[in-house]
Image (cartoon, helix red, strand yellow):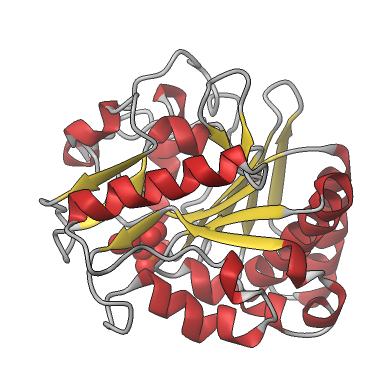
Amino acid sequence: MATSSLTFSTSLPKFCRPYSISITSPPQVSVYSKKLDSSISSALKISRRRTARASSMASSGITTIDQNNKKVVEVLYTEEDLAVSLAKYTSDLSDKFAKERGAFTVVVSGGSLIKSLRKLVEAPYVDSIDWSKWHVFWVDERVVPKDHPDSNYKLALDGFLSKVPIPPGNVYAINDALSAEGAADAYETCLKHLVHTGVINLSSLSGFPKFDLMLVGMGPDGHVASLFPGHPLLKENQKWVAHITDSPKPPPERITFTLPVINSSAYIALVVCGAGKASVVQTALGTNQNSEVFSCSNGFT
Ligand SMILES: O=C1O[C@H](COP(=O)(O)O)[C@@H](O)[C@H](O)[C@H]1O
């Protein structure tokens, strides 16, 4: 596993260590790690009871709450349960931010995350969420035309955005006519404008933008956004949006939010699904003692 090393650097040293979760035995593992507040905490308990009722074969899953570090790790046994829990979590935060600040800034990744959002476009959420308050961004994007099969925008459009009434002007896709570097710079400029106009908050702690919610996946190698294990981009601590031209996973040219931006979010849900990712998740949670790799304790806070 040493090749999966994410050497995040940060001053927050011990996030995931308190968690001790067995994630090796279920046939399918859905790990859902997120920041906590009291409303979300009770939502999780409801979710846990519901999953217990839903499955007579398996136990309900495991929820670990770390009040000190405001983190929750929820391990669910089916992808269906994960989608249900994720929809409730997202809907609750949508309500909260729409009421508190009249806007809800949501960042999505590509990949399997989009499928896991499918319950949001079904009843009751499709009708109950105030979609007019949503502002949608991408944590990373492949530098390809928007109608290309590799486009994260196209993936989200087909699977999610085309099914809900988010104002088109609130959906912030990259400029696909630019180079990777140009697209990253243009996206950062767009974010700065939206901070200036008050759509996106700025973190007084870090000075980086503070999105309301990040919904992000993780690859089987442990990459998050387009931040890959061992890549120098992990050390970027000035830019908000960076470009990469040597992505280990094709396509090679991408743009990505930097780690300080991801870590400045008000809420983050790291959504990981499938037995093939169990090992790297175990490592990320700090429960794989034989690995020196991608550890949340090293930086993904
Ligand atoms: O290339 C990417 O991969 C990751 C993980 O995708 P998954 O299909 O394994 O969930 C994704 O989060 C990222 O946005 C995407 O650009």
Q: Is 268 displayed left or right of 287 in the figure?
A: right
Q: Is residue 286 visible?
A: no
Residue sitting farthest toward the left = 246
Q: Is residue 164 above or below residue 110?
A: below
Of residues 111 and 136, the one drawn nearer to the viewer in this rendering = 136
Provide residue 146's location: percent of width, then percent of height. Answer: 33, 77
Provide residue 128's location: percent of width, then percent of height. Answer: 87, 75
The number of callouts visible is 0
Asked which quadrant contains residue 276, the reply is bottom left
| Location of ligand 1 given as a quarter of the image | bottom left
At x 64%, y 76%, the residue is 80
Provide residue 48's location: percent of width, then percent of height. Answer: 80, 58
Of residues 281 and 288, the one drawn nearer to the viewer in this rendering = 281
At x 52%, y 76%, the residue is 115
Asked which quadrant contains residue 296, the reply is top left
Q: Is 227 displayed left or right of 194 in the figure?
A: left
Q: Is 82 displayed left or right of 8 in the figure?
A: right
Of residues 66 and 186, the one drawn nearer to the viewer in this rendering = 186
Image quadrant occupied by the N terminus: top left
Q: Is residue 40 above or below residue 131?
A: above
At x 71%, y 54%, the residue is 104
